[in-house]
Image (cartoon, rainbow, N blue to C red):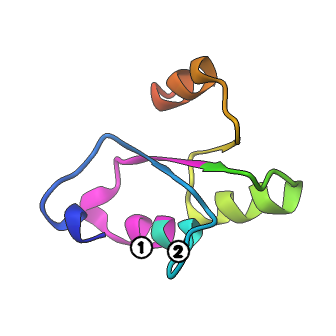
Amino acid sequence: MALLDTWTPDAAVIDIGMPDMDGCQVAGRIRADARLAGVRLIALTGWGQSADRARSQAAGFDAHLTKPADIVTLMETLAGEP
């Protein structure tokens, strides 16, 4: 989060199950910061049930991929392709 004070990425691939602050909390903070409005957020997680997908969408993720993600799918998702 501290890095985002000085740098704005085009996209971020974020694991949901992280210690201290989970990925949905990270996404929520990013979405709350107007300076970061254009950052594409992709959840990459082992959690893939419909409730998990709904939670990541509610947190502001643009996409939800489950591990292990296919590299072609990841690259297409980073590029904003369906």
- The three-letter amino acid code for the residue at tag 1 is Arg
Image position of 68 with respect to 3: above or below: above
- The three-letter amino acid code for the residue at tag 2 is Gln
The residue pinned by badge 2 equals: 25
Answer with left or right where residue 6 lies relative to residue 21. left
Answer with left or right where residue 1 lies relative to residue 71. left
Tag of residue 55? none
Quadrant of the image occupied by residue 57: bottom right
**Badge 1: how crowded within 10 Å, few (<14), some, or many (20+)?**
some
The residue pinned by badge 1 equals: 29
Please tell me which residue is depicted at 56% across the width and 69% down the height of the picture.
Answer: 18
Quadrant of the image occupied by residue 58: bottom right
Q: CA distance from mark 2 to mark 1?
A: 6 Å
Quadrant of the drawing holding the C terminus = top right
Q: Nearer the viewer, residue 8 or 45?
A: 45
Please tell me which residue is depicted at 34% across the width and 47% down the height of the picture.
Answer: 38
Tell me which segment is drawn in magenta: 27-43
Q: Secondary structure at mark 1?
A: helix
